[in-house]
Amino acid sequence: MNFLKSLVAAGLVAASTLPVRALDISGAGATFPYPIYAKWADAYKKETGNGMNYQSIGSGGGIKQIQSKTVTFGASDMPLKPEDLTKSGLVQFPTVVGGDVPVVNLEGVKPGDLKLDGVTLAKIFLGDIKSWDDEAIAKLNPSAKLPKHAIVVVHRSDGSGTTFIWTDYLSKVSADWKSKVGANTSVEWPAGIGAKGNEGVANNVANTKGAIGYVEYAYAKQNKMTSVSMINKDGKAVEPSAAAFQAAAANADWEKADHYYVILTDQPGATSWPIAGATFILIHTQPQDPAAATEALKFFAWAYKKGSKMAEELDYVPMPDKVVTAIQKMWTAEIKDGSGKPLFSASN
Amino acid sequence: MVDVAWQETGVDVQDVAERARVLNRLRIGDIVFHRITKTAALLVLMVLGGVIVSLFLGALPALQEFGFGFLTTQSWNPVTDKFGALAPIYGTIVTSLIAMLIAVPFGLMIAMFLTELCPMWLRRPIGIAIELLAGIPSIIYGIWGLFVFAPFLQQYVQPPIIAAFENIPVLSTLFAGPPFGIGILTASLILAIMVLPFITSISRDVFDAVPPVLKEAAYGLGWTQWEVWRYVVLPFTRIGVIGGVMLGLGRALGETMAVTFVIGNAHKISTSLLAPGTTISASIANEFTEAVGDLYTSSLIALGLILFIITFIVLAIARYLLLRINRRIG
C-alpha cells in the first residue's frame, strides 16, 4: 500500500514538474458543427497554445458522454428540454446557426424558381401530394409550368440534427404531420427513400428526376443545388441565405426562452428563413474539473468574439451579438466551481 | 523416444537423475505447448460467448419492452419509441435470396466454363478478373451502385419493366412503380455481383479436383458436356459447391455499406421489389450514431442479435445438408 502511495505521489510530482502543460479541452457530439469547431480549435491553438479536442460522434453520443462526465462539454443539434438539463445538472447554449433547405430535381426549374409553404411541404413529405402538377403546388406557383411527374421524396436515413430541424418545422406548420409523424432526429417516414448523410440525400436528389429532399444550408450552397423558396410565418417568400438565417436567429426570443430551449423553426419576421436551427453546447453547472470547464468557456468566448468570420467562410451563421451577451451573462450566473465561485466573467 | 535415442548412441545411462531431468524438461515443453494451443482455441470460444452475452444484455431492454412482437411488427418509430424488426428482417432475407437466385446459376456456369470449356489462354484472364472482383471493397460497390448503376436502372431498365408487367396479375405488384432506381431489387443485384466471385472461385477449385479419368470415361461413353457436368462433376463436388454457396450467402446477409447506399433505407415492407426497403445491417449502420434514448439503442442491438441468429441458422442448415449428403453417399 505504501509503495503504491509513493508511486502515485511520484507520478504527481512528475506531472506537476513537467514544462508548462497546455490545457486541452475535450468535447464530443454533433457532426454538423464539426468543421467550424475544428477550424476554431486550430486558430485558438495558434493564438493561445491551448488545444481543443472535439470528436464528432453524433449528438446522441455527445449527450451520453457529457452525462457520464467523460468530456468537458457535449454538443447536440437538438436542444435538451429544460427538465432534462436540470436533471443532469447541465446548461446549454447555441454556438452557430444553420438550417435546412429543400432541394429539388425538376427539369427547367432553377434555384428559387419554385415556392412552397409549410403545409404543402408537409403534404409532400406525408405522401399526400404525389405529383408535381398538384393543385396545391400550382396555386403557389402560378407562373411556373410544372410537369406531371411523380414526386420522389428523399430523406435522411441516419439520425441527424438536420432531420430534427426539418421535422420540427413540419410539426409546427402541419397538425397532420405532428400527429402522424412528429419531430425527432429520426422519424418513421411515411413516404420516400432514405439516404445517408447530406451527401447521400444530395446525390439521390441529383440522380432522381422529380425528387425533393432537404440538406444542410451550407451543403446546398456549396454544391449549388436547386433550392426552393419558402413562404415564412409572415407570409413572405424568402430564399435561403445567410441573412435569412440570421434574421430567424435575431427574431427568436432568446432572453425569455427557458434554458435556451429555442428551436429556430417558423420564426416571425419578414426576412426570416423558416427552417433554421442552432447547434448547442452542453456543459455541467458544477463541473468536476472546473479548470477544464473554465478553459472551455474561454474557448467559446473567444469563438464568439473572433470566430464569426471563420464561421461565415464555412457558411455557418454566427450568433447575433445580443444573444452572445445574454449567453455570457448566463455563464457567469449558472456555471460555478465547488465553492460557488463563477468560472467565467465577461471581463476576461 | 529419449530412451531409444540414448540406446542407439550406445551411451550407458548411468546418471538416472540426469536422464529424469531431460525427460522432465521435454514433458514440460509438451505441456506448455498443449496449454498454449488450448488457450488459443478457448479464446475463440470466449470471444464468441462474450459477443453473444453482450448482444443479449444490450438487447434485453428492447426484448422486455416489446416481447415477441419485436419480430412481428414493422413500425419503427423513434418519436414514440415503438420498434419492430419485421421490415429489416424481411429486407435482409429477401435481398439475400434474390442475390443467391442470380449468383448461384451464374457462378456455377462461369466455373464450369473455366474448368471444362474455356480455351487455355482465356482461363487466366477470366480467373484473375473474378478474383479481383472479390477484392473490391464493398464501399466501392456502394458508390458505383448509387452513382452509376441506380441511375441506369431508373432511366433505362425500370420504366420498361414497369410498363411491360402492368397488366400481368402477380408481376404487376412485384414490379410496381415509380422507378426510384434504388430499392430492394437494386440492392439484390449489387449483392449478386458481390457474392459471385465467392461462388465461382470455390466451385472452380472443386471442379478442378474432379479426377480426369471419371470425366474421360463419361465422355468416352458418348455423354454430352451438360450430362458430364450434371451427372459426374456436380455429384462429385456438391459438398464444395454448397460450401461456396453458403459462404456467399453469409456475405450477402451481413453486407452493410453497399446495401445501405442502394436499398433506399425505408422501414417498410412493400410488395414491389422496386420499392425502397432496409436490411438489418443497413439499419444499424445508419442509425446507431444518432440513436438517442436507451430503448432505441437497445432495439438496434436486438437487430444485431437477430442477424447473429439468422446467420447461425443458415450455417446450421448448411451443416445439416452436408451431413445428409455425406450419409447418403456413404
Image (tube, rainbow, N blue to C red):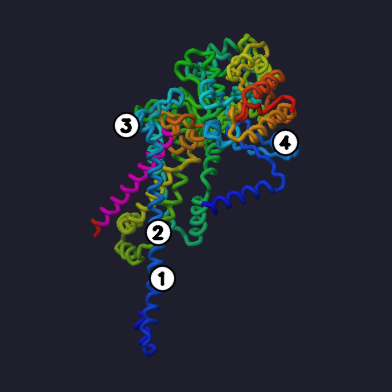
- Rounded to the nearest angstrom, the CA distance separating label 4 from label 1 is 60 Å
Residue B230 lies in the magenta stretch = no
Closer to the N terminus: mark 1 or mark 3?
A: 1
Would residue B240 appear left or right of A100 to someone viewing this image? left
Q: What secondary structure prevails in the magenta region?
A: helix
- How far apart marks 4 and 3 lie (CA) works out to 53 Å
The chain that hosts pointer 3 is B
Give the residue drawn at x 71%, y 18%: A322
From the viewer's side, name the closer residue of A178 and A25.
Answer: A25
Please name the residue that numbered disc 3 is placed on. B68
Mark 4, residue position: A44
Figure quadrant of the C terminus of chain A: top right
Q: What element carries label 2?
A: helix
Residue assigned mark 2: B39
- When asked about the image quadrant of residue A79, the answer is top right
Label 3 sits on a secondary structure element that is loop
